[in-house]
Image: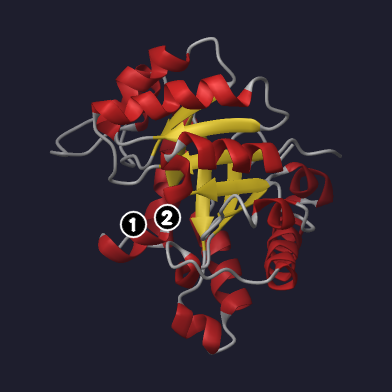
Amino acid sequence: MARRKLVAGNWKMNGLTAQLAEVEALLGQIGTPECEVAICPPATLLCRLAPLIEGSPLRCGGQDCHWADSGAHTGDISAAMLADCGASLVILGHSERRADHCESSALIAKKVAAAWRAGLQAIVCVGETEQEHHAGQTMAVVTTQLRDSLPEGITADNTVIAYEPVWAIGTGRTPNTGEIAAVHTAIRNALSDRLGAETATAIRILYGGSVKPDNAAGIFATDNVDGGLIGGASLKAADFAAIIAAAG
């Protein structure tokens, strides 16, 4: 089964209103891309981004959501609120959420279920730290996070997996394509063991961690890599457009 690649930009805690000019520039550069493209801006920009990209090839999404549909959770955002702004997907379980906010895989699984209830596609992140990498624990860490972060009911339509080695995020350091292929294959095999080969084959697995215009094509050509979750390079239209082109 051919899996259409997805390139998703994670703006993290970056971007004021003026940053939306980069989206307008991006739209002028990418034409009709062969891959799916999404931008996940800060929540403050989501309701302004959605109408800007209406009718374009771009999708938009959130960077996190609460596990509850509503309630007394000051400062949090529900999946339904993201959908109400025009989002069609949400990033969950990013290493920065796991580290900075002490999010467990069990909590992430609850958030994934909430995203599904709101009709959002969940991009579920897994990845090992540098210490775990050097200790040879990459496969164990990644497959355990994968198992514990995914509730029952996974399909290729409601879930995308993103492998992001923590030590590569924003550092300029990237695993070689052999290392990336090995981890992505392990993820595919773990999904197959749980869901069966047919469902597992249809689920997209993205790579994230210092993806740039000059290394994107090689990464995207790697076995079981179905696109990328892009951080800093997604903030500049020219860089993001080059990465999108590399996924074609």
Residue at (73%, 70%) from the top-left corner? 182
The front one of 30 and 219 is 30
Question: Whole-percent x and y of residue 90?
Answer: 44, 37
Is there CB contact under 8 Å for labels 1 and 2?
yes
Q: Amino acid under label 1?
A: Arg
Image vertical order of residue 65 relative to residue 96, above or below: above
Q: Please report the residue visible at 84 percent of the width from the left and 38 percent of the height from the top.
A: 2
Q: Which amino acid does label 2 sit on?
A: His
Residue 23, horizontal then vertical, whole percent: 43, 26
Question: Would you say 32 lies left or right of 38 here?
Answer: right
Above or below: residue 170 compared with residue 133 = above
Element carrying mark 1: helix
Tag of residue 53 = none
Please name the residue that numbered disc 2 is placed on: 94
Q: Is residue 101 above or below residue 231?
A: below
Task: Give the residue drawn at x 74%, y 65%.
Answer: 181
Assess disc 1: are there few (<14), some (14-19) or many (≥20) residues with their C-alpha within 10 Å of its C-alpha.
some
Q: Classify mark 2: helix, strand or loop.
A: loop
Give the residue furthest to the bottom: 135
Residue 97 x, y percent position in the rendering: 33, 57
